[in-house]
Image: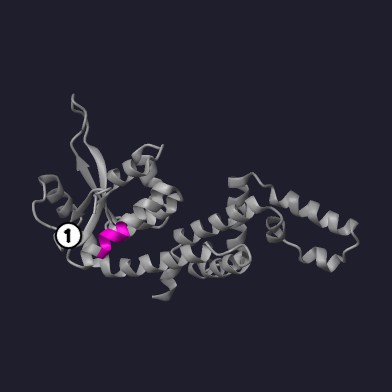
Amino acid sequence: MNELIKTITRGDGTIAVSGRELHKFLGVNDNYTDWFKRMTDYGFTENVDFAGLSEKSDKPTGGRPRIDHVMTLDMAKEVAMIQRTDRGKQARQYFLEVERRYKQGQIDTSGLSLQAQAALAAAQAIAAQEQRLNKVSSKVDAISDIVATSTMDWRKATRDLIHRIAKVRQGDYRITQGDIYKDVDDRAGAALNIRLTNLRRRMAEEGQSKSKRDKTNKVDVIANDKRLIEIYMAVVKDHAIKYRVWDDEY
């Protein structure tokens, strides 16, 4: 197997990934520090999912040390999935293959560099959580499958996920969905409130009953626009990952 992204074998034998190596492979336009901070907003925890690592500057003239991060393999898979790009998909498939080979004892753990040894020491605090994070990976896979369902099932799939998000947040379903609508507005420039008002007005002009108009909601607005359906599903998925909806099952 060709090494697409450098991985590190830790002292306990588990596999970790350099944040900068992953950032480079994904071809992210944002600088590493801003990108990594944005990724941690999806609910990852320092010294559980990742650990900081200070490296010597790679500039010929020297300079301040640059910051890298050692990520668990499960975090790396999640981060790759979040990108929703071909490179992200390729990275995730690569990490799944690394994991498969590791479980089969096919990875050579000898000959680590001094830099890798330093990374091992920095990542020791992560090892105790590895078993729990393996469960997380399977749950994220399940979320990906749900959100990728056909358009015939998107209402039920997203509704079920929103119920789970609300449960994790210990909040009301309507509040959670309101936050999701806001993100859809921001991402798509959709103005859902105005679209809903216009939709109800057209229904009134067509002679449809007031009770039916009152039951019409923003999901019905979204259903009339294929692009909005795709954005809505992506936002729900992002919220599900951010709030780690699988945690309520453990």
Which residue is nearer to you in this view: 165 or 235?
235
Residue labelled with disc 1: 107
Extreme residue in the left direction: 111
Snapshot quadrant of residue 159? bottom right
> On the rendered image, what quadrant is the C terminus found in?
bottom left
Q: Which part of the image, by quadrant, shows the N terminus?
A: bottom left
Instruction: Tell me the magenta residue range.
Output: 95-100
Residue 144: image x %, image y %?
47, 62
Between 39 and 74, the one nearer to me in the picture: 74
Question: Where is residue 189 drawn, in percent x and y?
Answer: 64, 44
Pick out the residue farthest to the top: 61
Indicate left or right for 145 with 65 as reference. Answer: right
The amino acid marked with disc number 1 is Ile
Is residue 45 among the parts visible in the rendering? no
Name the residue at 15% across, 63% down. Answer: 12
* Principal secondary structure, stretch drawn in magenta: helix
- Asked if residue 244 is among those painted magenta in the image, a careful observer would answer no
Residue 55: quadrant of the picture:
top left
Which residue is outermost to the bottom? 250
Residue 98: say if magenta.
yes
* Callout 1 secondary element: loop
Q: State how the image is colored.
A: one colour
198 relative to 7 in the view: left or right: right
Task: Decide: is 219 above or below 115.
Answer: below
As drawn, 133 above or below 82? below
Task: Name which residue lies at 37% across and 37% down.
Answer: 31
The mark tally for this picture is 1
Pinpoint residue 6: horizontal percent, then vertical percent: 23, 48
